[in-house]
Each structure stands twice: as C-alpha cells, then as structure tokens.
Image (tube, rainbow, N blue to C red):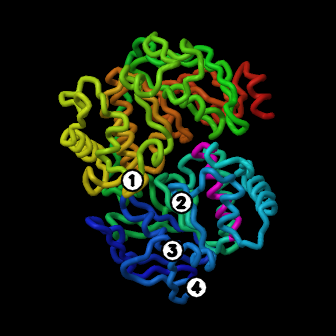
Amino acid sequence: MRLELRGISKHYPGVVANDDVNLRLQPGEIHAVLGENGAGKSTLMKIIYGAVRPDAGTIFWNGAPVEVRSPHDARALGISMVFQNFSLFETLTVAENVWLGLESTISLAAVTERIRAVGGQYGLEIDPERPVHTLAVGQRQRVEIVRALLTDPRLLILDEPTSVLTPQAVDRLFDTLRQLAATGCSILYISHKLDEIRRLCHNCTILRAGRVTGEVDPALETNASLSRLMIGADPPRLRHEEVTPGAVAIEVRGLSLPQRDRFGTALHDINLAVRSGEIVGIAGVSGNGQRELLAALSGEDVHGDDAAIRLFGNPIGRLGPRRRRRLGLHFVPEERLGRGAVPGMSLAQNVLLTRSHDRGRRRALIRRGWIGLGAVAELARSLIGRFAVKADGSDAAAMSLSGGNLQKFIVGREIDAEPLALIVSQPTWGVDVGAAAQIRAELLALRAGGCAVLVVSEELDELFEISDRLVVIAGGRLSPSIAIADATVEVIGQWMSGLWPGAQVAGESHAA
C-alpha cells in the first residue's frame, strides 16, 4: 500500500473540513477524489502534502505510520503536489520558481534545461526564462505541473490540473499521467470534470461535507450517477432559449496594440461585435493574446485608439474600468485572488471593488462619500445565498474560501449588477458540476434578458454549451466568427493553430 489515511479529521471555526476520512492508494493507481466545492478535497490533499496539520488521524506511507509536518517532509518522502491556486513567486522566472523546490545541488542552468526537456517531452512547453507575472493562467498551470514532474514523485497530487488546459493539452497530460502510473507512481486526482475522471482514473472516492460517502470504479459510472453521488442530485439543465439579438453592444474595430514587453503578445487588427441578447465565445490556447485583449476591453489598457472600442456606438477606448462600469460594462478576470478579489479583505469589502456605484440600485452603497456598511453587508449576504457560496458569513476573508466558492462569489457579484454588457474570463474555473451549471444558467439568463455577453474560456465544452457564436484567438489575431451550429471541436482545434480560412499570414506568424 503506497498511502493510507485512517480517521483524518480537520476542523476550522464554524467548518468541519474533514471528518474521519479513510482512503487507500496502491502503487501505480490513479485515484480520483470527487466532491462539490467546499467538500474538503483540497484540505485533505494539503494534509497529505504537509501544508495543513490534521486534528486527528494517521497517515501511513508504504505501510508505516508517518508524520508529515511540512511540504519539505512530503517531498522527502516523494510526494509532490500541483495546487489549484498557484504557489508561484510572480517576480521570479519560471526556472527560478522550479529551482526553489529542488535539490540545492542542482544548478539553475541545469534546471532550465530540464524544464525545456520535460516540457517538450510532455507537451507542456514553457519558456524557463520568462517572469511568472507575464504568464496567463494556463501557462502558470503548466509551470506547476512541470515543477511537480521534475521531482520524480512517487505520489503526485493534482488539484484541478486541467481547469485551464486545452483539449489537446489535456490528452497529452493524460498520456503523461498514464506513463507515470506505469512506473509505479501513484496519483491523487481532483477534478470536477466527470468525463476526465471516467477516462483516466481507476478508483474514485466521493466526499460530501467533509465525509466519505462512497468509493466507486468511475469506468462503471455515468456522468449523471457521479453527479448524484457528488451533489446528491442531478445538475440543473440549461435552457438555451431562442433570442433575437438586438443592437451591437460591444464593438471592436481594427484594434492593434504593440507588444508591451518581450513576453507579451501584440494584437493585430482585431474586429469583433457582440449584440445585446447573445453570447459570443472566444476560444484559444493560453498566451495567444487573451490577456492583452481583455485588458483593452476592460479598460485596464487604454493605449489603443479611442474609437477602436465602442459600447452601444460610443467610443470608450480611453475610458478606465470604473467609467466603463458606470456605462453598464462589467468584467470578471481570470485570476480570482489578486485581481477578482483582495485575499485579506472580507467578502463584504470585496463587493465594493466593482459595485460601489450600481446603476439603479434601491439603496446606494456609497452616498456623498459615506459607505453604507449595512447595505454592503446585505448585498454580500444576498450573493452568498443566491449563488450558494459556502462561507462563514459576509465577514469571511476572500482567501478563506475554496477556489470554486470564491469563483461563484466573484461571478455572482458581476451578474447581480444587471450589466448591459458582461465580459467574463474562465467563468467556471475550478467549480463543481452543479455550480458550473448554475453559473452557465445565470449567463444564459443574462442573455435572455438582453445583455451582451463575451466569454473567454479554454474549456471548449463550456463554449459549445452556452455560446451563440465562436471566434478563436491565435497569435494576437482573431478568426472570423462561426455559428455554434456550424462549429465542431475539430474545426475550432485547427483554428487554434491560426489556420482558419484566409489566415495564412496569421498561421505563419503563430507558427513562428
């Protein structure tokens, strides 16, 4: 037996994260841990990795009891972990971040070469000399996975490893994991993607409210049966109502922006229109200009021509985020902690980041410079209730929430603002199947109410499920739009390489 947990329990104020959890893992076994957001999965993995100390219970490693007091102890045993919320130093390079977790006898130059070799071997290419702060979320995920692989682990823990990977990258990662398992490496795999668990894993332990509620062979289950085991019910079905799109809400005309730094992506003649009452999806491999385009659309980057970006016909290219919000354009960034929410601030305080001047609210959150603390707390509580966020009240710090629950709160904050236009990046990153269905249903409800919605996602299944039209970004260029009825995974996958009709120049640039 490679790993055995007996009676593991962990309590926090007002929360039972793990309650008498037992789990067994054989050498070479790929074992899924499944549960809705806040079920205790990440806490359990952090206990195994030594990042959290249990209140009770015993860990057995290769048949002997061990005390894993820190990640250093875990790595000494051969345990490596890829966190859902990345643990990277933004001002350091990729190679420097990886180097920190390896033997001190290995030189930085050797680590740089190993990153290139392992990245090429497993289809996880990343520039070792690039600073982490210049990387998109999908690229940061690659860094975490490569760092774990370089330790030659005997147990690899993966917490939502494919949440921002493309289908092609997921297939390559699965090949990698199967190769590792064949060498005797055990893998604990957390994912809310039920298809992945059924394809990859040998066994599956289900957690609900911190307790083990079952263990099954996922290959013998259906998505529906796994969903019922996880959340106790079938996820809500999406209603994709027929809506006649209205006037153009978000329009981009010939937007070109130079490369801001040597690691960025220049934007080339971007043209895009999103009408009221439709959802347009943007697909693409991480690092192909999504970050730069979203910065221009949200108002974080105002270096473009004023008339290049329009909202209901009015030029807004030089307006900042606050002025755009007042005109009805809201934005959900891909990074939850640090951009979507301030980690150490309460949920109520985080409401004020984007909701301080709501259009048409009965009770203003700020009047004549005074913050209405009661109104702020009331709004935070309503968001927690409406979007089923598991949190210890409106005073809970953002960083105390699980990744999926914080995602629900941030997306809910912007949806609840009743925007005229909404731009959202990775809307269901790291949330469970039930919560993902709820968020997608809310986006469809916005569309039905006449809102223009632009969704950037690296989950093709999500884009196909909610979009009316798709475009692809590759090498800083945007493809023509294609109606969802005419799109296929194969076509979109080809376009992700820059190879759409009439795009020879784009394809050559991307390949270079």
Residue 394's spot in the image, x, y percent? 26, 50
Q: Which mark is residue 62?
A: 4
Mark in the foreground, 3 or 4: 3
Classified by dominant secondary structure, the portion drawn in magenta counts as: helix
Magenta stretch: includes residue 106: no
Magenta stretch: includes residue 143: yes
Q: Residue furthest bottom?
A: 64
CA separation, marks 1 and 2?
19 Å
* Residue 153 seen from this side: yes
Tell me whether circle 4 and circle 1 mark residues in contact (CB < 8 Å). Answer: no
Tell me whether circle 2 and circle 3 mark residues in contact (CB < 8 Å). Answer: no
User: Which residue is located at x 32 percent, y 23 percent?
Assistant: 449
For the magenta stretch, what is the residue range? 135-152
User: Residue 152 occupies which quadrant of the picture?
Assistant: bottom right
Mark in the foreground, 4 or 1: 1
CA separation, marks 3 and 4?
17 Å
Residue at image mark 1? 344
Mark 4 Cα shell of 10 Å, populated few (<14), some (14-19), many (≥20): some
Q: Earlier in the sequence, mark 2 or mark 3?
A: 3
Residue 88's spot in the image, x, y percent? 59, 56
Residue at image mark 3? 50
Q: Which mark is residue 83?
A: 2
68 and 162: which is toward the camera: 68
User: Which residue is located at x 49 percent, y 28 percent?
Assistant: 298
User: Which residue is located at x 61 percent, y 18 percent?
Assistant: 255
- Looking at the rendered structure, the secondary structure element under dot 3 is loop
Give the amino acid type for the residue marked by disc 1 in the picture: Gly
Q: Earlier in the sequence, mark 3 or mark 1?
A: 3
Give the amino acid type for the residue marked by disc 3 in the picture: Gly
- Looking at the rendered structure, the secondary structure element under dot 2 is loop
User: Which residue is located at x 56 percent, y 46 percent?
Assistant: 164
Q: Which mark is residue 228?
A: none
